[in-house]
Image: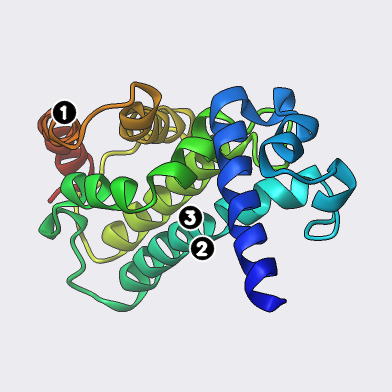
Amino acid sequence: MPRDKTAAYERIIRCLKEEFLTFGYEKASLNRVSSKVGITTAGLYKHFKNKEDMFFCLVKDTLDAFHSVTDGSIDQMETEKEYNPFDADWAMFWVDFIYEHYDGVKLLICCAKGSAYESFEEDLIRKEAKTNREYANILRGSGKMIKDISDMQWHILATAYVHLIFEVVRHDMTREEATEHMQFVKDLLYPGWRQIYGL
């Protein structure tokens, strides 16, 4: 019956998430998952192609949400002449984002080693550094006094920012702790960013 299949699938998802969050991708045991669900390991493959597909199913919505945010920022930067990233409270935005997608973010940052997504944070850092350089060039073209910094320095800045954001899930912060942490990040980094961008 469809309802039974739906209930079974939801139970599988729940147990897979618990397994990956507890043991990480590499050490996750499909035998353990199937035992908890009450099916054979072969039964898992009626729903998924392989272990990688199982992990992807758990992080897909979070990946889509990340892409939507980063692509939207790039579009804004390229189309709005008066775009200023400091007009929005990005520090608090990331708190809301993380707690809306907490398990997915935790899986990608802390539990993805051995999966196709183990370089997720590094990929995001590279994208952040590239976007920041492009934004600096746009501002420079409009006459702003942009500091001339090297590709390595852009990478270091992006690494610091992205890494600090994800400390929220690495340390299992409460929302209150995360809000305080991201306010600290904002106070620490934003003045330097403004100086670099001449804003």
Q: Secondary structure at mark 3?
A: helix
Q: Residues within 10 Å of mark 3 (few under 14, many from 20)?
A: many
Q: Amino acid at mark 1?
A: Glu
Q: Which residue is mark 2?
A: 64
As drawn, the label of residue 62 is: 3
Decide: is 20 above or below 143: above
- Residue at coordinates 37% horizontally, 49% vertically from top-left? 132
Please name whichever residue, 140 or 170, is drawn nearer the observer in this view of the structure: 170
Q: Position of residue 129 (x, y in %)?
A: 44, 43
Q: Is residue 4 left or right of residue 102?
A: right
Out of 118 and 147, give the one closest to the viewer. Answer: 118
Residue 137 placement: quadrant = bottom left
* Number of numbered labels in the structure image: 3
x 43%, y 53%: residue: 131
Does residue 123 appear left or right of residue 47 in this picture? left
Task: Quickly name the residue at label 1.
Answer: 177
At x 54%, y 39%, the residue is: 108
Indicate which disc, 2 or 1, sits on the residue closer to the N terminus.
2
Expressed as whole percent of the image width and height from the top left, the position of residue 62 reads: 48, 55
Amino acid residing under circle 2: Asp
Q: Secondary structure at mark 1?
A: helix
Question: Do residues under tags 3 and 2 come within 8 Å of each other at their CB atoms?
Answer: yes
Local crowd size for mark 2, using a 10 Å CA cut-off: few (<14), some (14–19), many (≥20): few
Q: Looking at the picture, which amino acid does disc 3 mark?
A: Thr
Q: Residue 162 lies in what quarter of the image?
A: top left
Q: CA distance from mark 3 to mark 2?
A: 5 Å
Above/below status of 89 relative to 109: below
From mark 2 to mark 1, how far is it between C-alphas? 26 Å
